[in-house]
Amino acid sequence: MHTPPLVRRLSGWSPVRSAARRLAYGALVAGLLAPAAAPLGAQSSDRRPTVAVLPFENGALKNNAEFAPLSKGMAEMLITAMAGNPGVRVVERDRLQKLIDEQNLGSGDRVDKETAVRLGKLVGAHHMLTGSFVIDPKQRMRIVVRSVNTETSEIEYAESVMGKADDLLELVDQLGTKLNAGMKLPAMPIRLSKSTPGAPGAPAVAALATEAPKGGNQFRATMLVSRALEKQDKGDTQGAIALYKSALEEYPNFERAKTLLASAERGPAPATP
């Protein structure tokens, strides 16, 4: 671009200084974009559809504040259910939570479609799942989830399940299976039952990789895990560990609680140089 002589004299312009400024500006822009671009580059070879789950909207009809932590817990449980499908890449909850905190969005608040699309694009997700739950005074629960396509900005699918709050993990497993089918994601893995007739390798009923076992109170255990996630997000790791242990005392076969406890006790991975 031609620079008039008068401007050159007034600004002290020179070809060397101008080139240096351009190089410095380019380095600055590259530095700002690098953190955002790096994950996308790492994902470029992974062609699986990517799903992210936002915190659920709390629609409890009674004692609403008491159930507030469940917004994060429900998202974590659905992420676990969706991650049982190896044909899908699922964004980790804490990664999305950091972005939500940066955007000053409160957990449990309603997220509109436009915000869901924007957040989805920032984490490289093709499908953003937004959900809500309602618990009535009789401890019956209804969970509703909508999938927003981040490319078209349209709600592409909606699904719901209903049942006793005490069977919460089983409800989430059902929801994950329905979402995989309804969103036309890659087929779920095939699980073989010991009672399945036929030769080895014969297909059985498709199920999530981690089936919710019987025994214990699933709802109370999930509430404890939900409170642990809140503490962990605030940096209170020891408080989170205590709550994870309480969840396992309530429901010893809670596999996700075991994983989260082990991760909290291990601590964050050391930063790469």
Image (tube, rainbow, N blue to C red):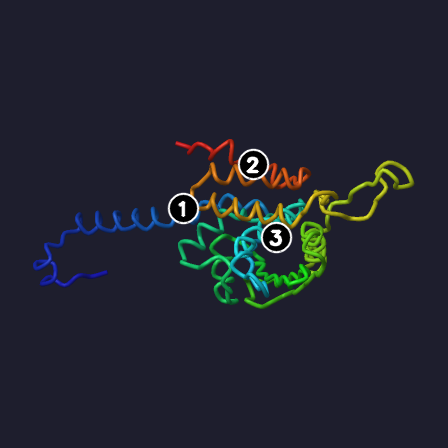
- From the image, tell me which residue sits under label 3: 49
Looking at the picture, tell me which residue is in the foreground, 106 or 119.
106
Residue 227: percent from the left, percent from the top?
52, 47
Q: Which mark is residue 261?
A: 2
Q: Is residue 246 above or below residue 219?
A: above
Which of pointers 1 and 2 lies earlier in the amino acid sequence?
A: 1
SS type, badge 1: helix
Q: CA distance from mark 2 to mark 3?
A: 29 Å
The answer to which of marks 2 and 3 sits earlier in the sequence is: 3
Q: Which residue is mark 1?
A: 35
Decide if residue 9 is in sight here: yes
The amino acid type of the residue labelled 1 equals: Pro
Q: Quadrant of residue 11?
A: bottom left
Instruction: Please name which of the two marks, 1 or 2, marks the residue nearer to the observer.
Output: 2
Tell us which disc is closer to us: 2 or 3: 2
Residue 198 found in image quarter: top right
Q: Earlier in the sequence, mark 3 or mark 1?
A: 1
Residue 193 at x, y = what percent?
Answer: 83, 41
Q: Residues within 10 Å of mark 2 (few under 14, many from 20)?
A: many
Local SS, label 3: loop
Circles 2 and 3, Cβ within 8 Å, touching? The answer is no
* Residue 48, x across and y down, in percent: 62, 49
User: Given the image, on which type of amino acid does mark 3 rest?
Assistant: Pro
How many angstroms separate mark 3 from mark 1 (CA)?
22 Å
Amino acid type, callout 2: Leu
Q: CA distance from mark 1 to mark 2?
A: 29 Å
Neighbours of disc 3 within 10 Å: few (<14), some (14-19), many (20+) = some
Which quadrant does the N terminus fall into?
Answer: bottom left
